[in-house]
Amino acid sequence: MSTAEVIEQALKLKAADRYLLLEMLHSSLDKPDPEIDQIWQEEILHRIKAFDEGRLETVSMKEAFRDL
C-alpha cells in the first residue's frame, strides 16, 4: 500500500481513531536519546546552580510575557 493510500484510508477513520493514529505516529518519532537527555540534565543543573548563586539574570513573568 502506498503512502497516499494509507493517508486516504486514515482520513476515513473516526476522529478518535485518527487521534490515536496521530499519537502512535508521533511517539514512534519521539524516541528519547540518552546522550541528549544527559546533556540537558547537566545544563539544567548548571542553570539551577547559577540561579542559586545569583549569577543568572532573570526577569519577572510579567516582563517575559509583556509582548505576547
Image: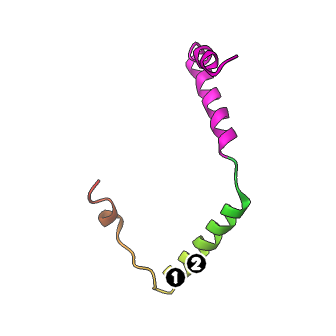
Residue 50: percent from left, percent from top: 51, 82
Give the residue type at disc 1: Ala
Residue farthest to the front, as pictured: 2
Look at the picture and state if 64 lies above or below 31.
below
- Specify the label residue 46 is tagged with: 2
- Specify the label residue 65 is tagged with: none
- The overriding secondary structure of the stretch rendered in magenta is helix
Q: Quadrant of residue 46?
A: bottom right
Look at the picture and state if 22 lies above or below 42.
above
Counting labels gives: 2
Give left or right: position of 25 versus 51. right
In this view of the protein, which residue sits in the foreground, 50 or 7?
7
Q: What residue is at 32 percent from the left and 59 percent from the top? A: 65
Give the residue type at disc 2: His
Q: Which residues are magenta?
A: 1-30
Residue at mark 1: 50
Q: What residue is at 70 percent from the left and 16 percent from the top? A: 1
Disc 2 on helix, strand or loop? helix
Q: What residue is at 61 percent from the left and 75 percent from the top? A: 45
Disc 1 on helix, strand or loop? helix
The chosen color scheme is: rainbow
Q: Are marks 2 and 1 in contact (CB under 8 Å)?
A: yes
Residue 17: percent from left, percent from top: 63, 21
Give left or right: position of 62 versus 2. left
Q: Residues within 10 Å of mark 2 (few under 14, many from 20)?
A: few
Look at the picture and state if 54 lies above or below 61.
below
Q: Quadrant of residue 25?
A: top right
Q: What residue is at 62 percent from the left and 38 percent from the top? A: 26
